[in-house]
Image (cartoon, coloured by chain):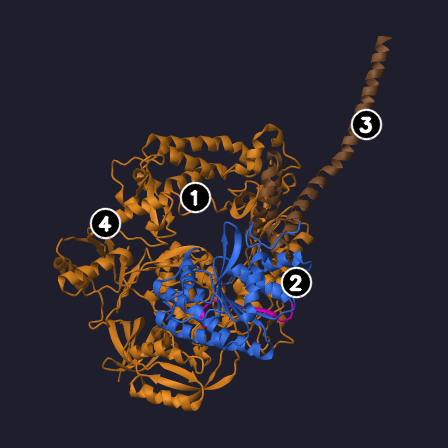
Chain colours: A orange, B blue, C brown
């Protein structure tokens, strides 16, 4: 028996074996490990025995035996029949038809992603170091040679970059490939030439990672088409005998948080990674560092981690925790809500407290934030689907405010157990980021902590997500209820010390009027922490901060539209035009450059005095717009489609742009973004009002007037709350504070 | 100011109630139309206020406590007196699995103890979720049908139109066969009203010249509004 | 999942819409005042949601009253000041009159 040591690079299940790609010192190596997935059934013996006989007859399972496992909701041991499934395809088949028996039978572990199940069982994880005993390429024994929580460095990867070349109006773009610092352009009208050219490059480079721009949306669909036309296979996979693919060529549109989003189809490879930087949320947020961090902790293979939400990672960690404690995974989603009185629904069905801030500009404001409030609450109060309204603590469990639900005192919940190490690791990464000596290190640890942040954020959402395996609405409600209570306790403590709460938002408070010395604020924070058991931090002390009014209701503040300057010189802004991704770059830059001038103000008086200078800057940007010389790519607006292009009833700009894509034969889905230029918004001819980005011609001119309007609106945000102060009478500062002292404002809409 | 009980401004709901209420003792009722959900919510509140037991299975995620609160104020009660009354219970289903389990197990369990009116709002809403394979949806729907037929208590199913894939929409055709009365709660130019489409007295056989014209109407109106 | 109960901002809009005809018949300046009162309701949306009080109109009116109360209290001390000033003005006037009378003499 030989030994193989290296890093687990890729894993997938083919038939009755797991295929493992290991990066070793000698290069990538493929290992095979026999793997029989397991499904568990609970029910009466006679019908179960009959079922087993029939399943054996169909060769779906190899055997069955009785065993004891833990039932998730009750925490009690139950006797179940363990089915040893013949392999991956058989498992899929079973998970399709077994549900028909659900009801009289209880089915467990029947709908798991198999590569992950294999990793839970073996304790291996993606990008982790392993040690295996092998005969030939067959694994006899295998173990992880490190823990996922340990410090890791990215394995050294051969990266081949691919991106489309040229425009893509109907015709295929061609490919630009970058490997080893060299550029290659692959362009040909003949598919077979393209395929051979790319193949020779693949042979030459033998890349571990194919990093694409628009690979999922454009390149791969096209490459596979070329492959079909050429009748010659592309050697994209490293596996010489890759399993056959069932490719979905259409992505899907889905709803989340009141927004429709589009997820393009995926093109994973076998033995190599394909990551489309444009389609991967995690790549955008945390880069390869973030993806690998997520994959290691969650045991979701890298390519899947790149393209799924952090929610999938959290869910996988819960599954892993369940496996390690012998807990059965209930088939399908979640526990239905317990019957409750409609009054309880009315009381419990609320989110976090979101105040409308006092509109105006204020000086000396402290912002204090609870750190990862919801995950911290889940930990501090042991909130998990199985601990809320548990059967064991009806009498003496902790009571949730408002709804009065009880929480388990006897069993540690699955969710807190999963969260604890993530919170700890994130703190560690944040510390490493602070202490980083090089910029490279700082970025590395920032990316890792960002990946973890997203996991923490989604963990809460997952409790209430309808398709979450370990979801339960009452757990979700309990977290927000304790969140409201926590915020109010903080408010009361602060007000007790003479502070005035200008604004509060779920887990953050903006305080004014009291003692603004840092050590006094930190003392307040310590008191709040002791009282609430939730960690809190001083986000900063603003020299000045503007809370902006709603665009629809000028007098009313909106929770997340504010900007301010901290004492340490840092700027914090939310909801300003320059922060919004749909704002044209030119407008973003213009607003930011005007804002830069204003952020030299140490107080509101200085701010007011700087406005004339800021207006000069504004005028410069306006002149540039009017000159007609701004490059079109800086003026693109982007909007998400809320429906199919043909379903738009009104000829909005977005609809007009979307139709231009459609006319060129490019199919768009709800949730996809379109970007376009405003050409002549008042043109009676609708077709020429806007121009979709890919179709901009050099002779296209932009609508300077329309863009000036956008610019003006963006710039005016910067002093809109001081506008009232323009008249000399109100300029007289009262009680030492310039124009809009809160006492004057009093939340009274002007 | 004492508000009237309204679905939306200018649409008082009491008018709708009488007719639906009359139908319930005569057997299972399927209520369609754009006002089906508020009507079912109000009706459950009205019955609870008069001492009836109600189990509200909220598949549409649409129980609006404010409708009952306005009704309470109108009859001089505090909303809590109705919404928190013993015997008025609610559970929301967010997936078709949850809905099926609720009706198969939980509702049956509660009914064994005490009879009650069972209200099921939007049972098909959860079945439109494209994330769940059609095969599985079909199997679950069969179980749902069985569970609904097993309910011996009075039953009100409120099912407004919802968007969904074509094959999934065929499930809508199955609903009328589960009930004795089909009614539509809608708003037309004279205000809200209920139309009885499949009365108790009329026996329905597929041989009677295909679908009844009125039932066909029920199917047509399924998609008129979101 | 979750969020079955309509968000308070929506309930508030419903209440406002239910009074459409009332608002329509108001004079323009009264309509503006009406809109400002509802804006107060929006300003206090967080406490309203938290309250668990089932009659939204109560909360909207209370929110408006709170803002009015603050306004009143802010100007209440002014009344004393105004009284003092008025007394002073009266005294000055008296003095002026006295001076005039003296001058005429």
Q: Chain of mark 1?
A: A
Q: Residue placed at 62% from the left, 43% from the top?
A: C37
User: Measured along the vertical axis of the image, is residue A704 above or below residue A386?
Assistant: above
Which label sits in the foreground, 4 or 1?
A: 4
Residue located farthest toward the top when viewing the structure as drawn: C105
Q: Is residue B86 magenta?
A: yes
Q: Tell me where residue B64 appears, x and y as whole percent.
A: 56, 59
**Looking at this view, is A471 or A658 the one in front?**
A658
**Looking at this view, is B4 or A671 the one in front?**
B4
Whole-angstrom CA distance, mark 4 to mark 1, is: 30 Å
Q: Residue placed at 63% from the left, 31% from the top?
A: A732
Which label sits in the foreground, 3 or 1?
A: 3
> Hey, which quadrant is residue B56 in on the image?
bottom right
User: Measured along the vertical axis of the image, is residue A705 above or below residue A204?
Assistant: above
Q: Tell me where residue A363 appears, x and y as whole percent.
A: 59, 42
* Residue at numbered disc 4: A168
* Residue at numbered disc 1: A578
* Residue at numbered disc 3: C87
Q: Could you confirm whether marks 2 and 3 are on the same chain? A: no
Q: Could you confirm whether marks 3 and 4 are on the same chain? A: no
Question: Dots 2 and 4: beta carbons under 8 Å?
Answer: no
Secondary-structure class at tag 2? helix
Say whether residue A149 is visible. Answer: no
* Residue at numbered disc 2: B80
Secondary-structure class at tag 1? helix
Say whether residue A395 is visible. Answer: yes
Which stretch is magenta? B85-97
Which label sits in the foreground, 2 or 3?
A: 2
């Amino acid at each position: 028996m030989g030994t193989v040591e290296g890093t687990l690079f890729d894993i997938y299940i083919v038939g009755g074996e797991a295929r493992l790609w290991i990066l070793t010192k000698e290069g990538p190596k493929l290992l095979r490990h026999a793997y029989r997935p397991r499904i568990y059934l609970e029910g009466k013996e006679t019908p179960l025995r009959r079922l087993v006989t029939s399943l054996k007859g169909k060769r779906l399972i190899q055997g069955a035996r009785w065993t004891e496992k833990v039932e998730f909701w009750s925490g009690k041991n139950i006797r179940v029949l363990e089915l040893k499934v013949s392999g991956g395809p058989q498992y899929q088949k079973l998970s399709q038809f077994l549900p028909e028996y659900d009801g009289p039978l209880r089915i467990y572990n029947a709908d798991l992603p198999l590569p992950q199940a294999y990793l839970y069982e073996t304790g291996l994880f993606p990008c982790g170091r392993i040690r295996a005993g092998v005969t030939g390429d067959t694994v006899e024994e295998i173990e992880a040679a490190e823990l996922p929580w340990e410090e890791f460095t990215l394995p050294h990867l051969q990266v081949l970059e691919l991106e489309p070349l040229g425009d893509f109006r109907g015709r295929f773009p061609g490919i630009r490939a970058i490997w080893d610092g060299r550029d290659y352009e692959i362009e040909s009208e003949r598919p077979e030439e393209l395929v051979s050219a790319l193949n020779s490059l693949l042979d030459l480079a033998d890349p571990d990672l194919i990093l694409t721009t628009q690979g999922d949306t454009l390149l791969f669909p096209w490459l596979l088409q070329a492959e079909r036309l050429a009748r010659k296979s592309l050697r994209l996979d490293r596996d010489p005998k890759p399993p056959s693919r069932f490719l979905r060529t259409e992505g899907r549109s889905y709803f989340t948080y009141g927004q429709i989003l589009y997820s393009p189809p995926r093109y994973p490879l076998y033995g190599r990674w394909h990551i489309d930087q444009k389609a991967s949320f995690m790549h955008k947020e945390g880069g390869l560092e973030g993806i690998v961090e997520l994959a290691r902790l969650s045991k979701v293979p890298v390519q899947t981690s790149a393209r799924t939400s952090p929610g999938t990672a959290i869910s996988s960690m819960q599954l892993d925790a369940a496996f390690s404690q012998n807990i059965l995974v209930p088939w399908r989603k979640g526990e239905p809500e317990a019957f409750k009185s409609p009054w309880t629904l009315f009381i419990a069905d609320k989110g976090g407290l979101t105040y409308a801030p006092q509109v105006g500009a204020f000086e000396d404001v402290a912002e204090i934030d609870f750190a990862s409030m919801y995950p911290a609450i889940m930990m501090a109060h042991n909130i998990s689907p199985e601990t809320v309204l548990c059967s064991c603590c009806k009498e003496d469990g902790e009571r949730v405010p408002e709804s009065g639900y009880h929480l388990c005192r006897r069993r540690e919940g699955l969710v807190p157990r999963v969260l604890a190490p993530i919170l700890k690791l994130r703190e560690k990464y944040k510390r490493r980021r602070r202490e980083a000596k090089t910029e490279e290190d700082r970025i590395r640890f920032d990316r890792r902590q960002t990946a973890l942040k997203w996991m923490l954020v989604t963990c809460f959402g997952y409790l209430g997500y309808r398709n979450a395996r370990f979801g339960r609405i009452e757990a979700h409600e309990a977290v927000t209820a304790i969140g409201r209570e926590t915020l109010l306790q903080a408010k009361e403590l602060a007000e007790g010390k003479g502070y005035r709460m200008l604004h509060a938002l779920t887990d953050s408070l903006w305080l004014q009027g009291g003692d603004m010395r840092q050590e006094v604020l930190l003392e307040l924070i310590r008191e709040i922490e002791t009282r609430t058991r939730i960690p809190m931090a001083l986000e900063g002390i603003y020299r000045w901060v503007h809370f902006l009014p709603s665009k629809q209701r000028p007098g009313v503040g909106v929770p997340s539209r504010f900007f301010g300057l901290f004492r340490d010189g840092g700027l914090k802004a939310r909801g300003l035009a320059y922060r919004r991704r749909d704002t044209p770059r030119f407008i973003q830059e213009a607003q930011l450059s005007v804002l830069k001038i204003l952020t030299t103000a140490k107080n509101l008086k200085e701010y007011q005095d700087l406005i004339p200078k800021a207006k000069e800057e504004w005028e410069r940007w306006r002149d540039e717009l009017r000159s007609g010389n701004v490059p079109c790519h800086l003026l693109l607006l982007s909007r998400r489609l809320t429906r199919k292009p043909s379903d738009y009833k009104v000829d909005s700009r977005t609809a007009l742009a979307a139709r231009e894509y459609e006319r060129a034969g490019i199919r768009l889905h709800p949730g996809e973004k379109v970007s376009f230029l405003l050409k002549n918004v008042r043109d009676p001819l609708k077709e020429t009002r806007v121009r979709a980005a890919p179709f901009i011609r050099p002779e296209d001119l932009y609508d300077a007037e329309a863009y000036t309007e956008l610019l003006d609106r963006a710039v005016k945000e910067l002093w809109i709350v001081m506008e009232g102060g323009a008249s000399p009478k109100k300029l007289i500062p009262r009680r030492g504070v310039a124009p809009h002292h809160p006492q004057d404002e009093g939340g009274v809409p002007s | 100011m004492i508000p009237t009980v309204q679905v939306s401004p200018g649409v008082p709901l009491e008018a709708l109630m009488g007719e639906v209420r009359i139908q319930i003792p005569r057997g299972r009722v399927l209520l369609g139309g754009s006002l089906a959900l508020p009507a079912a919510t109000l009706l459950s509140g009205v019955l609870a206020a008069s001492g009836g037991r109600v189990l509200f299975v909220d598949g549409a995620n649409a129980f609006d406590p404010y409708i009952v609160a306005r009704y309470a104020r109108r009859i001089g009660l505090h909303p809590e007196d109705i919404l928190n009354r013993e015997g008025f219970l609610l559970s929301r289903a967010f997936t078709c699995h949850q809905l099926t389990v609720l009706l198969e197990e939980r509702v049956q369990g509660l009914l064994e103890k005490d009879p009650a009116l069972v209200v099921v709002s939007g049972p098909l809403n959860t079945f439109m979720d494209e994330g769940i394979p059609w095969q599985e949806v079909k199997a679950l729907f069969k179980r749902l049908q069985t569970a609904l037929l097993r309910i011996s208590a009075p039953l009100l199913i409120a099912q407004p139109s919802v968007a969904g894939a074509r094959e999934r929409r065929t499930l809508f055709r199955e609903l009328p066969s589960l009930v004795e009365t089909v009614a539509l709660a809608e708003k037309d130019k004279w205000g809200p009203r209920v139309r009885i489409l499949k009365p108790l007295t009329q026996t329905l056989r597929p041989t009677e010249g295909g679908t009844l014209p009125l039932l066909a109407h029920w199917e047509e109106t399924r998609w008129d509004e979101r | 999942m979750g969020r079955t109960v309509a968000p308070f901002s929506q309930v508030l809009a419903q209440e406002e819409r239910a009074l459409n005809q009332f608002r329509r018949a108001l004079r323009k300046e009264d309509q503006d005042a009406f809109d400002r009162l509802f804006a107060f309701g929006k300003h206090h949306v967080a406490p309203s949601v938290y309250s668990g009080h089932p009659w939204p109109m109560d909360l909207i009116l209370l929110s408006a009253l709170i803002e009015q109360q603050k306004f009143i209290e802010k100007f209440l001390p002014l009344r004393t000041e105004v009284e003092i000033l008025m007394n002073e003005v009266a005294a000055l006037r008296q003095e002026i009159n006295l001076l005039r009378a003296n001058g005429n003499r």
